[in-house]
Structures are given as structure tokens and as C-alpha cells.
Amino acid sequence: MIRGYEPVSLLFVIGIVVFLLGLMASIALHEIGHLLPAKLFGVKVTQYMVGFGPTMWSRRRGETEYGVKWIPLGGYIRMIGMLPPRPTDAPGKVRSVSTGPWQALIENARDVALEEVRPGDEGRVFYRKPWWQKVVIMAGGPAMNFVLAFVLFAVVLMGFGVAVQKPQVAAVPACVKTAAEYAKNPACTAADRPSPAAAAGLRPGDVLLAVDGRPAVSWEAATRAIRGHGAGPVSIEIQRAGRKMTLNATLIAQDRESLDHPGKIDKGVGYLGVSPTTVIEQQSLGAVITHMGNLTSATAGSLLRFPEKMVGVWNAAFSGEARDRNGPIGVIGAGRIGGEIAASTVPLENKIVIFVNLLAGFNLAIGLFNLIPLLPLDGGHIAGGLWEGLKRAFARVTRRPAPGHVDIAKALPLTYAIAFVMVIMAGLLMYADLVNPVRLSG
């Protein structure tokens, strides 16, 4: 029996459908990011499709066929003349065909690309456009993903708000207990040490203003001041019922998880023994920009470690290891997470926030992944356009004849090899998502 199988509820199914619809909308917008500049610059676009495989629905408008296909694993627009002819080609000239397998592959691809070019279309082929227009067209898709991710993050942070820990005391434990001791007996005994906060007279509702003279402008600032002080006497300035006062506490040394390196333990840091008040606060536009920047950096780092993370996916699929929640997941796994969110018991508003965050994260990842400078990804075409622009600029500076268009057809053998690897990785992710899926709970 498949380990990931479980009875499903109607909400679970609805969650999968909603997430897949959101994913399809993201794919559609990505392709619009290519379509609009292509039409603006006069490139002939014959197809705009969301999905792959057999066509579910299509409608022709002018010279372009718009449609949806059955497999929601991507999309594409078909522009004529993506590959330039060989420099030696001339109208009416019979082509000589090489017996080399790679050269034959390249020449066949050129033939297919040129078959789409009809009389009168010569000025509307992609490869003849200025290098900067080609870059704009190919960068439009990832740019659309980044814009969509930013808008969705803004909806969450500025619209719904996020949980923020305030430097206001929510609870003061009477004694100091480890997690294991608390699990055995949460009540304080004569053998337990009083907590420094309780001994100093701190109460729930007290607002921390300063610790050892250092302003507590946030809960993190207060925590860092307490930890950095270490064991010993410290003055704590608070506000209680509108009145400011100073309390004296004697901090004790504790081993606590690092604030800067999660999973690492900081030895002997100062410990007071208070918990913060958590409130939902709407954030500013600047906070959205910062959040987007931090996540972009983290996601880019994850992409650099993608091969290593795929080893973990392999082990999870075939060795039963636990899936890494921060590791790669495919469309099946993401849809399953959407179902798990919908079927959970959290309030509806929280479900919406999680859904929007998940979709925003996917758009960010898709945008960055497509910028990898390898064909068949958008980044490969962008790199080709930039290289063409660099060559032409160098020719102008050195007063040499303008070079021809960059021939990306020469990279087709590598393109097919990379496409093959991508198909294998996609298949592995699908299998792992079925037999050992990433779970939000448990």
C-alpha cells in the first residue's frame, strides 16, 4: 500500500483544486509576461497555451491560438523563428546534411523552426529582433512571477497582517523548568528554582522599556539584551498601568537555541523567564520589500543546493526517510499541501493566509528557477540575448563589422540533456509526493 495514502475529505479535494487553479493562473500570467512584449515588438505568436499534452479548449483570435491543455505542469507561447538559419543557407539552396547525430539534431530543429516562417513574416521572426527586445520578451515571464509574488506577499503582510511578538510580558513562570521537567510535572515544587522574572516582581501586562540601559524597541532587542548580559544582576525598566518603574532582577545562565542559527545551542546565555505578547499587525510596504528580499535570497540559496536536496528526495522516496519540509516538492505535493490546509481546523482567515503565502512562494521559486542561464529555461534565452548585445557592443567599440545573431541552436544537444534531467527530476518528485509526501502536521 502507498504510504502517503489516506482517506480524503471534500475539503481536502477542494483545497487541491483551489491550489491547482491558483497554480494555473500563475502559469497563465507567466506566459502573458512573454506574450505582451512579443506582440509589442512585432514577433508573430502562433500559440498561447497553459498546460501541456492534449488540448482541453482553444480559441483563435487573429493569428494566435489561445488554449488550455490537460496537464497543468507548465505552459508556453510559440513564437516563429526562434532559431536562426545557418550562415551558409541561401534561398533555394539545397541543404547538405551531416551524418553526425548532434549536427543532424541541430539541423532538423532549424528546419522545424523555419517551416513556421511564411512569406511576409521575415521581419517578424524572433531571432532577428534586437538583442534587448529578445531579453525583454524572455525576462517577461519570470518578471511576472516576481510581481505576482510581491503582490501576494503584500496581501498577506499589509492586508491580513502577521503575528508579531511585542516586548510586553504575556506570562511569568513561577519557577525554572526544562521542557522534560515541565512535561513530567508542570507544577512548581520546593526543589525548583524561582524564575528571575518572578523573583524580580514582573507581572503579565508589563511593557519592557529597557534592559541594562539598552532600549527594548522590540521583543528581539529585549531578548538579545537579556542573553548578551549573561548571569548576574540587571536593571529592567518597565511600564505598568501607565507608570514607569525600574525592577532589579538576577539573571541565571541557560542553554538556549541560537537566535541567528536555528538548531544551534548557545551555551550559558542570560535567562529572565518571561514570554512575549503576540499580536497581529499589518505591515508597511517597506516590510513587504524586506520580506521579499530575504525570501529571494533564501530561495536562491536553495536552488544552488538543489542537486543535494534531490538526494534527500530520493532517500525519502526509496528509503523511507522523512521528507525535508524546506526541500523541493512537485505539483502533486503542493496540491496535497493545499488539501491539507483546507481540511485543517484552523480558522478560515488563517487558511487563506497560508494558501496565499504558499502560492506566493511558488511564484518566487518559479521565477528564480526560470532565470537559470541554461536552455530550455528562459534564462538560457536571456543569456543568449545578453551575449549578442555584448558582442555587438564590442564590435562597435573596435569598429568591426556587426556580428551575426547568436546561434542558440548550437546549444541544443545540451538543451536536450538538461530537459531529460528535468523530466527525471520531475518524475522523482511526483513519485516521492505520492509515496512519502511533505506534511504540514505530524
Image (tube, grey):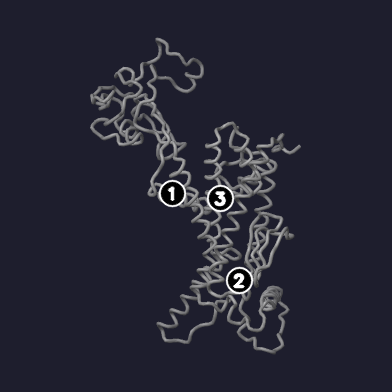
For badge 3, the amino acid type reads Phe
Could you tell me which secondary element the residue under label 3 belongs to?
A: helix
Q: Residue at the spot x=36%, y=22% of the render?
A: 204
Residue under numbered circle 3: 362
For badge 1, the amino acid type reads Asn
Judge depth for marks 2 and 3 and give the one in front.
Answer: 3
- The picture places residue 73, in percent across and down from the top left corner, at 66, 55
Residues at marks 3 and 1 touching, judged by CB atoms closer than 8 Å:
no
Check the image and report above or below for 288 versus 110. Answer: above
For badge 2, the amino acid type reads Ala
- The picture places residue 45, in percent across and down from the top left corner, at 62, 71
The quarter of the displayed image where residue 25 is located: bottom right
Q: Residue at the spot x=30%, y=36% of the render?
A: 217
Could you tell me which secondary element the residue under label 2 belongs to?
A: helix
Image quadrant occupied by the C terminus = top right
Residue in the foreground of this view, choosing between 106 and 440: 440
Q: Residues within 10 Å of mark 1 (few under 14, many from 20)?
A: few
Image quadrant occupied by the N terminus = top right
Residue under numbered circle 2: 411
* Mark 1 to mark 2 CA distance (whole Å): 34 Å
Q: Earlier in the sequence, mark 2 or mark 3?
A: 3
